Amino acid sequence: MVGRIHSKESFGTVDGPGIRYVLFMQGCPMRCLYCHNPDTWEVGGGTEITVDEIISEYKKNESFYKNGGITVTGGEPLLQVDFLIELFKTAKKKGIHTCIDSSGITFNPKNEDYIAKLDVLMQYVDLVMLDIKHIDPEKHIKLTAKDNANILGFAKYLDERNIPVWIRHVVVPGYTDDAVYHKKLGEFLATLHNVKALDVLPYHTMGAKKYDELGIKYPLAGVEALPKSEAVKAKSTIMEAFREARINSK
Ligand code: SF4
């Protein structure tokens, strides 16, 4: 079996714990306005790679990955669930820490075959980094062109299976910088019991260059980068709502 990747990175430091071998999987059904990797969108594009190739490249630098492991990101890695099962099953046999960085968009509780595959995959997953782009369904559609019901459903699915999760939320001026929704996000996260970390990131404009290179119009042209202090503030609001909801639920 082969996977389709956009690219790979041998020394990733922002995609999970420690230094990691990172695979940027090809294909994504979302269209986030601030996406940095529009060249990963096309399903069926990219290049092929096998599990053996990945493991042998990992082994070459194994000593660097002592506190790290393998991360699959994208694009949307869960589009290639069969390949991930094979990759992570092999990785776990070799004692390698495994992480999926996902938007959760492929989750669909009505698709029994897919859920059965996810159930198998989760046996070999140590950590999921889950992006929650917006807690409000309508605003989520405006930001990503997709509804968030299945994404929130995926968060609950991971909670039921006790899979550790790091949540990521990007604060974009004019789109996700409203404290009302930060509170709602905090309240939602309080219903989960598997959240180990929350990363709230400020929107930046570095992705715009790639759109120019690809000849695509950058949808957020003119939106200024968010000062880091605003992301810190948003995180406090989320955490405050999280703690309050926890207290109220006791
Ligand atoms: S989910 Fe990720 S890869 Fe897909 S459009 Fe959004 S930011 Fe880009």
Image (cartoon, rainbow, N blue to C red):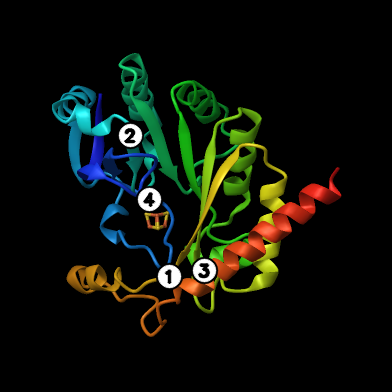
Please name the amino acid that badge 2 sits on. Gly
C-alpha gap between disc 1 and disc 3: 9 Å
Q: Which residue is mark 1?
A: 203
Is residue 178 found left or right of 127 in the rendered image? right
Sequence-first disc among 2 and 1: 2
Label 2 SS: loop
C-alpha gap between disc 3 and disc 4: 26 Å
Q: Nearer the viewer, residue 156 or 211?
A: 156
Q: Residue at x 21, y 28 (%)?
A: 63
Residue projecting furthest to the top: 93
Q: Which residue is mark 4?
A: 28
Q: Nearer the viewer, residue 240 or 75?
A: 240
- Where's residue 135, x and y in %? 63, 59
> Which is closer to the viewer, label 4 or label 1?
1
- Vertical placement of residue 62 versus 240, above or below: above
Label 4 SS: loop
> Which is closer to the viewer, label 2 or label 1?
2
Q: Which residue is mark 3?
A: 231
- Where's residue 223, x and y in %? 42, 82
Q: Residue at x 33, y 28 (%)?
A: 83
> Which is closer to the viewer, label 2 or label 4?
2
